[in-house]
Image (tube, rainbow, N blue to C red):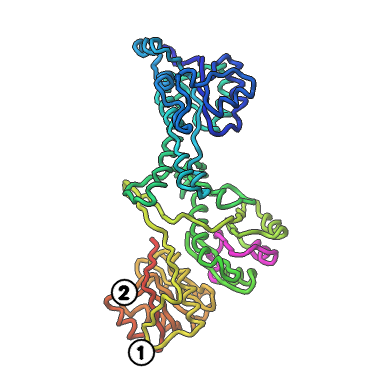
Amino acid sequence: MSDSKKAGSALISVFHKDGLEPVVRKLHDLGIALYSTGGTEAFIRDLGLPVTAVENITGYPSILGGRVKTLHPKVFGGILGRRDLEGDQEQLTAYEIPALDIVVVDLYPFEKTVAEGASEADIIEKIDIGGISLIRAAAKNYRDVLCVSSMEDYSEFLELLERSSGETTLEERQLFAARAFNTSSHYDSAIFNYFNQSQDIPAFKLSLLAGRTLRYGENPHQEGRFYGDFNGLFDQLHGKALSYNNLLDIDAAVNLMAEFKDDAPTFAILKHNNACGLATRTTLSEAYSDALAGDPVSAFGGILISNSPIDVATAEKIHSLFCEVVIAPSFESDALEILKGKKNRILLVQKHWELPGTIIRTCLNGILFQDRDTKTDQAEDLTLATETAPSDREREDLLFASRICMHTKSNTIVLVKNKQLCASGTGQTSRVDALNQAIHKATSFGFDLQGAVMASDAFFPFPDCVEIAGKSGIKAVIQPGGSIKDQLSIDYCNENGMSMVMTGTRHFKH
């Protein structure tokens, strides 16, 4: 038999009616018999078009408050009957089951209902039974049936009808079937994840429908895609399309600045997922200048983020720097025009700070899944380990440094003075290397480390780091503690008038 099929009938039962009218009218114009249920049937009748109620086929009304409408052999037989199998056709004839060649159906808005904070009863009623069954049946029998499972496909379906007068190829039906199973699997995943919030079944199911093709992956020879609702978090006001590396840096920037979202004007500059400059000041312009001073070399081609609206004074300073992305809660109109002066510069308005509570990454032939590190070290978490206590200013700087440290690649050491990142050692194989890197960078950019503080993302197994720091002028240290040799570092600090506080929380970031 030919792979092409001419449709003679269509079952239409949808929750969302937007965009449905031209589809229904075209089906009618092509002489395709219409079958429908409930609100969709009334919608079609209101258009003045003939339609047969499903109840007239099944002999049963809609029952149980609408829970059961299409779940009947005369409906599913009409969908699942194989046109080229003589036995199936004999049974359809014997039981007076009409063949259904097209199924247009969508699903109750389960995810939307959950997101709106509806009651459990309302959420349960939005678990579709008939719709999901119709989709699976029609998609399964794609050799004979075309399944349209989402209003997002109406326009393409309409073009198909207009182009071929109701005739479809096997390839076209298979494409729509694949989309249908995408719809059904996503829906079931959302329902499972809702129930699993309280059950903690050890299964991982993630389904994201929105995706965009990127220019390339980390390197031009690698393909890359992003799956997620980027526009739900940002409005892009200007600039070129985002790249794979842009997105990774933006993610790092947003997570870092979330630590400072309620602080005085704060500006950060990141490169390769790590902060190379960060400062909090009374004005954003000052914060930008002092963030840039932390490492003006690495800032070239970096990602910039602010916790405050970008004003003209700050924009004028930023404009002289080549940077990939600027992120802020908003931009003053004149500031925006200044920053648009570079056509490829990406300008993003961050609409909210909420990020997923979990982190997922591929590993070997599977995935790693963990809670996001949301434990920000607070003053009440600190335990004084030394005879000398940090001053109030040093204590503020220690907590400031700790917030940067937890968002910097391990092994890391962060040096801070007066709420300004002087330098950090990032991603080193030893903590001593990280410290030496940080000291070298800080001194090369003219920072005086007398009175600066040091943060470490993990404990010191030996006193070498506090000794190197002390000889560089650093007088206060924050670290998680927990080494069996903690006392060695404590003793050195006591002997040299340094203060040390412990947080009890390690912040590795691999």
What amino acid type is highlighted by mark number 2? Gly
- Give left or right: position of 494 versus 270: left
As displayed, is residue 410 above or below residue 466? above
Residue 37 visible in this rendered orientation of the protein: yes
Q: Residue at x 71, y 56 (%)?
A: 337
- Give the quadrant of the C terminus: bottom left
| Residue 381 part of the magenta-drawn span | no
Q: Which residue is mark 2?
A: 482
**Residue 172 visible to the viewer:** no
- Secondary structure at badge 1 equals helix
Element assignment for label 2: loop
User: Residue 318: x and y, percent?
Assistant: 64, 63
Q: CA distance from mark 2 to mark 1?
A: 21 Å
For the residue pair 295 and 135, the one nearer the viewer reads as 135
Would you say the residues marked 2 and 1 are in contact, meaning their CB atoms lie under 8 Å apart?
Answer: no
Crowding around mark 2 (Cα neighbors within 10 Å: few <14, some 14 to 19, many 20+) is some
Residue 306 is a magenta residue? yes
- Which amino acid, mark 1? Glu
- As drawn, 217 above or below 489: above
Q: Earlier in the sequence, mark 2 or mark 1?
A: 2
Q: Which mark is residue 495?
A: 1
Of the two numbered discs 2 and 1 in the rendering, the one whose residue sits closer to the viewer: 2
Q: Residue at x 49, y 56 (%)?
A: 355
| Image location of residue 191, percent across then percent down | 42, 42
- Which residue reaches farthest right? 334
Look at the image and give the residue range highlighted in magenta: 294-319
Q: Position of residue 23 (x, y in %)?
A: 59, 24
